Image: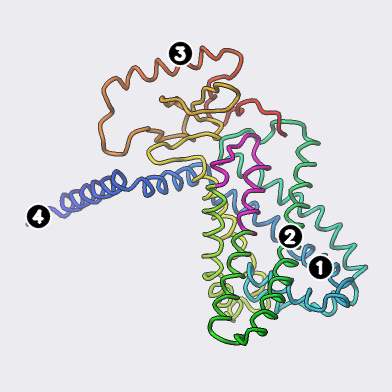
């Protein structure tokens, strides 16, 4: 009779070999694995939980302020409040239905002032927590730059996100109205073609909004960034958020209808949804600073870099960046290192030394990141 322990070990080895083979043949799989490892090693779940707390505190002041603002223009634009409710439901399925929109609109001045004050406090704390989380995932110092400049940048990001949301509501309302009039004029109103067209337009607007939000986060919150990688991360993040919305409709509905949570069902559903979105955001951030067969790339603060003309470029060598950058092998898993790889480390040292006072070799994490003019 075969030893069960030996059989288990043999099965584990075969599974490991099979996984390594898939990663060697499929670079995107290896990239996904390395991105998740980066997220896990740097405490992504814990960082997302901290950001979730402040995001939750920001939600209700934000909604109160938004509906109070729409209360001033509802006479001229009757559909603006419904557009805002639809926008909230697109990110937090069913949440707008739980809000007393009419009461908020009737007390727009007082509610708006209270919402603005509370949003400045809670919203800035949320942006600060999210900024620190992205910088930690990217192995950048959270304290680099002037503290006042960081707060002003946080305020700019918060205002920018608000403007993006309101702009998307306005664009959605205009496009919906124009497309409805056009379809009615050609006799296709209410048809299958009209439904498909309207759905595609809504999806396109939502994707554009999500890409813009992720670009805002990845370009403005880190101390140093890389535009091409930020764009790739924003595209992945947008597709993921739209996919999560489908899951969110089911998840939030299941949570809010669960009698176990009672009167706290809406709060629990909101917390769960925000946490899922923020976990995905940080997972995409980790994916952005990894690559196929490379666990640490620019704009990571611990990536091996040698700037040529002011732009950071990866070096064909990997420096030991400590526990936070473990597994930073430049070759596919399971393949032997190429001949001369031992010389690569010494050549990397020569490159780092040759750039002199232009750039320092990356310090082991959690050391400070490369110097940057941004706060």
Cα separation between marks 2 and 4: 58 Å
**Of pointers 4 and 3, the one earlier in the residue sequence:** 4
Residue 293 spot, x, y in % from top left: 37, 38
- Please provide the residue range marked out in magenta: 209-231
Q: Reply yes or no: does residue 225 show up in magenta.
A: yes
Tag 1 residue: 64
For the view shown, which residue lies furthest in the front direction?
A: 186
* Relative depth, front residue between 93 and 43: 93
Q: Secondary structure at mark 1?
A: helix
Q: Secondary structure at mark 3?
A: helix
Residue 312 spot, x, y in % from top left: 55, 28
Cα separation between marks 3 and 1: 58 Å
Tag 3 residue: 350
Cα separation between marks 4 and 3: 55 Å
> Would you call the spot at circle 3 few (<14 residues within 10 Å), some (14-19), or many (20 or more)?
few
**Of pointers 3 and 1, the one earlier in the residue sequence:** 1
Tag 4 residue: 2
């Amino acid at each position: 009779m075969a030893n069960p322990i030996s059989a288990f070990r043999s099965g584990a080895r075969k599974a490991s070999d099979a996984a390594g083979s898939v990663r060697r043949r499929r670079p995107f799989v290896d990239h996904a694995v390395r991105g998740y490892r980066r997220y896990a090693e740097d405490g992504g779940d814990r960082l997302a939980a901290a950001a979730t707390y402040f995001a939750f505190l920001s939600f209700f002041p934000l909604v109160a302020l938004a509906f109070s603002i729409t209360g001033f223009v509802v006479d001229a634009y009757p559909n603006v409040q419904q557009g805002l409710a639809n926008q909230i439901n697109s990110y937090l399925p069913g949440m707008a239905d739980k809000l007393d929109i009419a009461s908020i609109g009737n007390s727009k001045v007082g509610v708006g002032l209270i919402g603005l004050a509370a949003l400045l406090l809670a919203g800035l704390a949320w942006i600060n927590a999210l900024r620190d989380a992205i910088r930690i995932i990217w192995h950048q110092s959270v304290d680099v730059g002037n503290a006042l400049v960081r707060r002003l940048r946080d305020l700019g990001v918060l205002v920018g996100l608000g403007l993006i949301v309101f702009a998307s509501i306005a664009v959605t309302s205009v496009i919906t109205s124009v497309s409805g009039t056009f379809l009615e004029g050609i006799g296709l109103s209410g048809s299958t073609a009209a439904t498909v067209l309207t759905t595609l337009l809504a999806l396109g607007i939502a994707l554009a909004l999500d890409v813009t939000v992720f670009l805002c986060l990845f370009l403005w919150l880190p101390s140093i960034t890389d535009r091409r990688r930020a764009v790739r991360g924003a595209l992945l993040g947008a597709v993921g958020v739209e996919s999560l919305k489908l899951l969110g409709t089911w998840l939030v509905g299941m949570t809010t209808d669960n009698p176990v949570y009672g009167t706290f069902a809406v709060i629990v559903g909101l917390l769960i949804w925000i946490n899922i979105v923020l976990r995905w955001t940080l997972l995409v951030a980790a994916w952005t600073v990894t690559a196929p067969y490379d666990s640490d790339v620019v704009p990571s603060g611990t990536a091996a870099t040698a700037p040529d003309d002011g732009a950071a470029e990866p070096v064909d060598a990997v420096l030991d960046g400590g526990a936070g950058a473990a597994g930073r092998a430049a070759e596919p898993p399971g393949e032997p290192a190429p001949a001369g790889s031992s010389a690569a480390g010494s050549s990397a040292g020569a490159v780092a030394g040759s750039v002199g006072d232009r750039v320092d070799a990356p310090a082991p994490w959690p050391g400070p990141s490369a110097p940057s003019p941004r706060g």
